[in-house]
Image (spheres, rainbow, N blue to C red):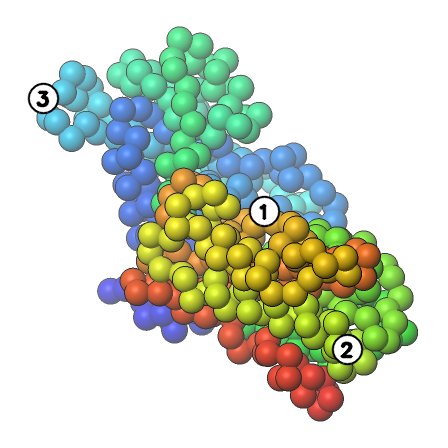
Amino acid sequence: MRLSLLAVALTVVGMAAAAPRIGMSGQYHERRAELCKNLNEGLTILLGYTEKDTEDLRGAFVQEPNFYYLTGWREPGAILMLAPLPSDTNAPGYGAQASLPREILFLPRRNLEQEKWTGVKLGPDDANARHLTGFETVLPAETMETELRKMLDVYPRIYTLTERPAAKRLEALAPLRQISSAALAIARLRMVKSSEEQVLLQRSIEATIEAHRAAWKRAAAGLYEYQIAATMMEVYFDKGCERSGYPPIVGSGPNAVVLHYSDNSRRMDRGELLLMDVGAECSGYTSDITRTIPLGGKFNKRQREIYDIVLGAQKAAIAAIKPGMSLGKTAPNSIYKIALEYINAHGKDLHGASLGKYFIHGIGHQVGLEVHDAADSGMPLEAGMVITIEPGIYIPEENIGVRIEDMLLVTRTGSKLLSGALPREPAEIERALSKGSP
């Protein structure tokens, strides 16, 4: 029986780091089966990250996102091999392919000395390996080359993540086979989020909203940007989130016009705008929310004018969301164009020019296991996608940078605002700041 959404949300927090998410192990298998249908002409091999791939003394090991999406496996050094059967039982080589295992997860043999440093790992020979991984066939990673040679007798093509350096290893092992990219096929699967994924995303959103609320309470002239970033991170770490979805962007005054500003080192002054683009990663899923607030509690006339234009553009873009629309700048049914046209039709810069030239990035992106989640840029929006809508105006000459970013679920008829619990109306923001309790 499938666990309820609430049960999924409650159980993911306390699980062992390596095992696939409780209630989602069946989904990992379904994803692999769907990928095999889409890539049924060849053998798919994905190499998970090793500890050297993510070697950084400042952070813990994090699995390669595509590998994790298909396996739920979070320990280093694993390899996935998928060997689909042709749908036609009369296809050449069907009998030879039918005798091979369909799915293999290769795990490194345990290194007891290394485990003293990095913790106990699951080995391929452990009695509970199949149960914990969700794979019927679990073999030592050291035997992958032997198994590959068997597969090469009957599979003419190999699919992998060709952009990764690890693909060179496969080219050396199979020099006579065509090696193609599986990235786009996996991205198309990742774009539509299951109900369980939506629950995990909502958890990260709620933790992030609480972080923004805490920042609003603390933000004041005389403090440094890094103090606000620290306040926000403390909140979502305290809620059990494992890391920031991306380096926190906390930019005051002139720093608010820098899109990916992350130094967070400036002392903040009264009367400036403070832009906070901060998101937590909880249970593997990331949020991405931006708010811009006035230091001192009140927008001045010009700040309020620019803020209202950005908010109006966001509302126009959100109203246009539905299946078939696009986030692309030049695509048919472009939501970006709607926001840009709104900005150009409202307000001027100090020289009388329209403000559209100060909207210097896209209108939004997919969000999921990564903050800029895997996507096929040519695909229109579809029900089940989770996206951001984030118009902005950045005017260096005036030290004004305003961005408002929310996360939305695309539905069959429109969209659902997932981060709407955090105020975005300017009057609500000012009221919350005056009370010190947003």
Q: Which of label 2 and label 1 is nearer to you?
A: 2
- Per the image, label 1 sits on a secondary structure element best described as loop
Name the foreground residue: 147 vs 184.
184
Return the x and y of residue 155 as percentages of the image width and height: 29, 18
Q: Amino acid at mark 3?
A: Asn
Q: Between disc 2 and disc 3, whose residue precedes?
A: 3
Q: Kindly indicate the quadrant of the structure image that contains residue 71.
A: top left
**Pointers 2 and 3 in contact (CB under 8 A)?**
no
Residue at figure coordinates x 39%, y 66% from the top left: 415
Residue 250 visible from this viewpoint:
no
The residue identified by callout 1 is 62
Q: Which residue is mark 3?
A: 90
Q: How many marks?
A: 3
Q: Which residue is mark 2?
A: 300
Label 1 crowding class (10 Å Cα cut-off): few <14, some 14-19, many 20+?
some
Quick check: can you spot residue 315? yes
- Disc 2 or 1, which lies upstream in sequence? 1
Taking depth in this image into account, of 336 and 215 the one nearest to the observer is 336
Q: Earlier in the sequence, mark 1 or mark 3?
A: 1
Q: Is residue 159 above or below residue 51?
A: above
In this rendered view, identify the residue nearer to me: 420 or 160.
Answer: 420
